[in-house]
């Protein structure tokens, strides 16, 4: 079944055509250059750019797949979570397209899509498995019990890991997107030079708290500025990265051991982080675990992952009508 999928939850306008786990086309129009001058995504600008780009991107996806609109058998769209104005552009376009083509409309949760990015390149990956979902807006450890069934074991109580990277990078004066830049220029961590905390949340066993770490870095930079002391930015970047990875990896491995998982997947934008990949890969090899993560081109927001997850949502009868609305926040295990 050929599914046309749409992703517009933040600052990427993406349309793809997929068939099961196979990607026939995947077009992404990014707004990074425009938002860079503001140091982060401006929601109103993002939604306007989605409106301007979505028809063109859709036509490009159809052309790259070598098909016509009449070959489309379903339309999938990210409806939650995300920036509400940005989501509404994709949802309303998808509703109109599905209605005009007379095909099913499939609502897809953004975090479920990030997990599905792994299905594109790992044909052997099937539920059940444990997944660390880590991005700019979300940090969750979830049991993937089936393709459309999830159990949350832990999550952030405040900031997401990606948000911690982005905001500390911005305070260091690094170019947007901060988390990517931080990872690129990081050298060697030095906790003696920059003794950053390892915050513990007051919530569940596998919950995270990144706000204290973010605040510690901001205070460190401000104090150095007041004393006219130079900050070794590459070393501080590496120290922040190490601390975030310490927290993510320890909780993930503890959850895997407690619940008996030997298959672990990583998904979301922060799954592109070089230290997270390398260290988690080493830890899984020591334990005999199988580790899965998507290639870099599928770590960020894209419509191909929406289409693949949409295939499983449709298979389970998850179809929406013209009353489908966008939702800014929604847990991955919604029903």
Image (spheres, grey):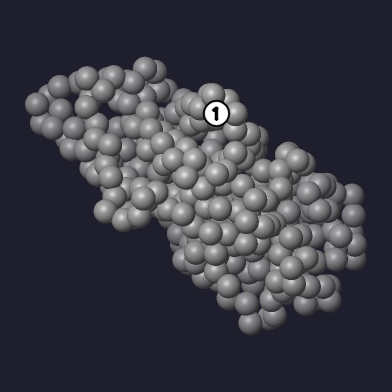
Q: Position of residue 47 (x, y in %)?
A: 53, 62
Residue visible at 40% across and 23% down in the picture: 186
| Camera-side residue of 31 and 140 | 140
Quarter of the image for the N terminus: give it: bottom right
Q: Position of residue 34 (x, y in %)?
A: 49, 46
Residue visible at 32% across and 26% down in the picture: 239
| Camera-side residue of 145 and 193 | 145
| Camera-side residue of 262 and 65 | 262
- The quadrant where residue 246 appears: top left
According to the picture, the residue beneath numbered tag 1 turns out to be 287
How crowded pointer 1 is (Cα within 10 Å; few <14, some 14-19, many 20+) is rated as few
Secondary element under disc 1, as helix, strand or loop, is helix
- Would residue 285 be visible to someone looking at this image? yes
Q: Position of residue 50 (x, y in %)?
A: 59, 59
- Would residue 35 be visible to someone looking at this image? no
Residue at the outermost left position: 227
Q: Is residue 108 left or right of residue 82?
A: right
Residue visible at 81% across and 76% down in the picture: 100
Residue visible at 55% across and 44% down in the picture: 260
Q: Position of residue 319 (x, y in %)?
A: 72, 74
């Amino acid at each position: 079944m050929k599914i046309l999928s749409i992703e517009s939850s933040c600052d990427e306008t993406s349309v793809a055509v997929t068939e099961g786990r196979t990607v026939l086309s995947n077009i992404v129009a990014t707004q990074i250059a425009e938002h860079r001058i503001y140091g982060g995504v401006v929601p109103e600008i993002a939604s306007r750019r989605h409106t301007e780009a979505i028809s063109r991107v859709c036509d490009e996806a159809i052309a790259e797949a070598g098909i016509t609109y009449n070959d489309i058998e379903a339309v999938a769209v990210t409806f939650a979570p995300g920036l509400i104005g940005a989501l509404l552009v994709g949802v309303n376009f998808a509703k109109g397209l599905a209605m005009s083509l007379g095909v099913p409309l499939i609502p897809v949760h953004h975090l479920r899509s990030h997990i599905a990015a792994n299905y594109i390149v790992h044909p052997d990956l099937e539920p059940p498995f444990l997944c660390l979902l880590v991005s700019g807006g979300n940090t969750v450890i979830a049991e993937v019990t089936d393709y459309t069934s999830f159990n949350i074991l832990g999550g952030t109580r405040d900031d997401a890991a990606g948000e911690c990277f982005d905001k500390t990078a911005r305070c260091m004066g690094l170019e947007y997107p901060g988390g990517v830049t931080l990872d690129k220029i990081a050298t060697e961590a030095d906790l003696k030079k920059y003794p950053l905390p390892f915050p513990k949340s007051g919530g569940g066993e596998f919950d995270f708290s990144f706000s204290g770490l973010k605040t510690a870095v901001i205070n460190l930079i401000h104090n150095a500025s007041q004393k006219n002391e130079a900050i070794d930015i590459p070393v501080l970047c590496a120290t922040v990265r190490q601390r975030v990875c310490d927290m993510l990896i320890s909780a993930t491995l503890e959850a895997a051991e407690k619940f008996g998982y030997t298959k672990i997947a990583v998904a979301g934008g922060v799954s592109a982080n070089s230290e997270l990949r390398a260290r988690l890969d080493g830890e899984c090899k020591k334990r005999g675990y199988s580790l899965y993560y998507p290639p870099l081109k599928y770590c960020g927001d894209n419509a191909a992952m929406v289409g693949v997850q949409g295939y499983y949502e449709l298979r389970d009868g998850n179809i929406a009508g013209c009353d489908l609305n966008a939702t800014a926040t929604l847990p991955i295990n919604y029903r």
